[in-house]
Amino acid sequence: RLRELGGLIRVAGDIAAGEGAKVVTREHVIRAKEIARSLEHQVASRTIEMRKEYKSFKTEGAEVGVVNGLAVYSADPSLSEYAGLVLPIVAEVTPAGSRSEGRIIATGKLGEIAKESVQNISAIIKKYMGKDISDHDIHIQFIGTYEGVEGDSASLSVITAVISALENVKVRQDTAITGSLSIRGNVLPVGGITAKVEAAAEAGLKRVIIPKSNLKDVLIDERYKDKIEIIPVETLSEALEHVLVGKGKKELLERLSRMRPPEVVGKVELESEKKIVEPKK
C-alpha cells in the first residue's frame, strides 16, 4: 500500500507547511487521511455511503439467527485499497426437504472460497458440537451482497448465525463479528481488519469480535477508539460467550465445553491452521 502511504505523507506535509508548523503532527496525518485517499478508495467509500441509506441491519437488541458480519469493498479488485462495510448474515434451520439428507443453501453472490467456507459448517457443527444436522436444511442469506463476497473471513459470523438458529439462542445486535474458522473451532486471522473495525464503529455498533491474532493489525483513527470495544478471541466458544444472550446460552456453552474435538497426537501440520502441533510430554 505504498501508493496510498505516499499520498498521505505528502498531504500531511502540505497541511503542516500551510500552518507554518515545523514538524508534522498526528493531527496533520489524521486530517490528511481523508484528503489523501485515492480515487479508488473514494469510489468505494461513496458506494458504502449510498448503501447506508438503505440500512439493513440492527445495532441494538437481540435476534435469533442474525449476525452482523463484516467485509471489505474495493472499487478495483486489483488494488489493495478498500473500505469496510457491515454484512448482515441471516440463518434459518428447517426440516430437510430431501429424504436422503439435508442441504446447506446459501443465497448471495458468493465466490468459490466463500462457498467452501459455508460448506464446512456441517463438519464444524458435527465435530465441535457432536450434533448431526443431516436431517436439516440450513438456509444462509448474505444480505446486500451486490458486489459479491469472496474469502472465508465471514465463516465465524456464519457459524454463529447457524448455531443461534439451530439452538434458538439470541445474538446481540450491537456486536459485529469477523474471523476465519478452522474445522477444529480455532479462529484464524483475516485481512482488512482496520477497515472492518472502523466500518462497525461508523455503523453505530458498540462491539466487534476479531481474531486475537489480528489484534496487532488494528490501527484505527483516534475518533473511533471511544466508539467501539474490540474483543479478541481465539476459539468459537469464546466468540459465542461474548455474542450470545438469554435463554439457552448457558446450556449451549456447557455442552460445547464437553464436546471439544479430540487432541492431535504426534507432530503434524494442520493444513487449515498452518502450524506445527507438538505432542504433549
Image (tube, rainbow, N blue to C red):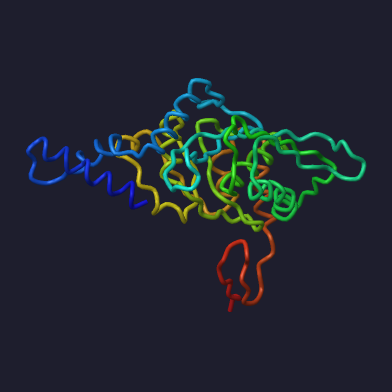
What residue do we see at 70% from left, 35% from top?
A: 107
Residue 259, quarter of the rendered image: bottom right
What residue do we see at 55% from left, 35% from top?
A: 87
* x and y percentages locating residue 229 in the rendered image: 41, 39
Task: Quarter of the image for the C terminus: give it.
Answer: bottom right
* x and y percentages locating residue 187 in the rendered image: 56, 53
Q: Residue furthest bottom?
A: 281
* Res 247 seen here: no
* x and y percentages locating residue 5 in the rendered image: 30, 48
Q: Residue furthest top?
A: 53
What residue do we see at 55% from left, 33% from top?
A: 172
In the shown orientation, is residue 118 left or right of residue 76?
A: right
In the shown orientation, is residue 80 left or right of residue 159?
A: left
User: 172 or 152: which is nearer to us?
Assistant: 152
Q: Is residue 238 above or below residue 58?
A: below
* x and y percentages locating residue 264 in the rendered image: 66, 69
In the shown orientation, is residue 71 left or right of residue 142?
A: left
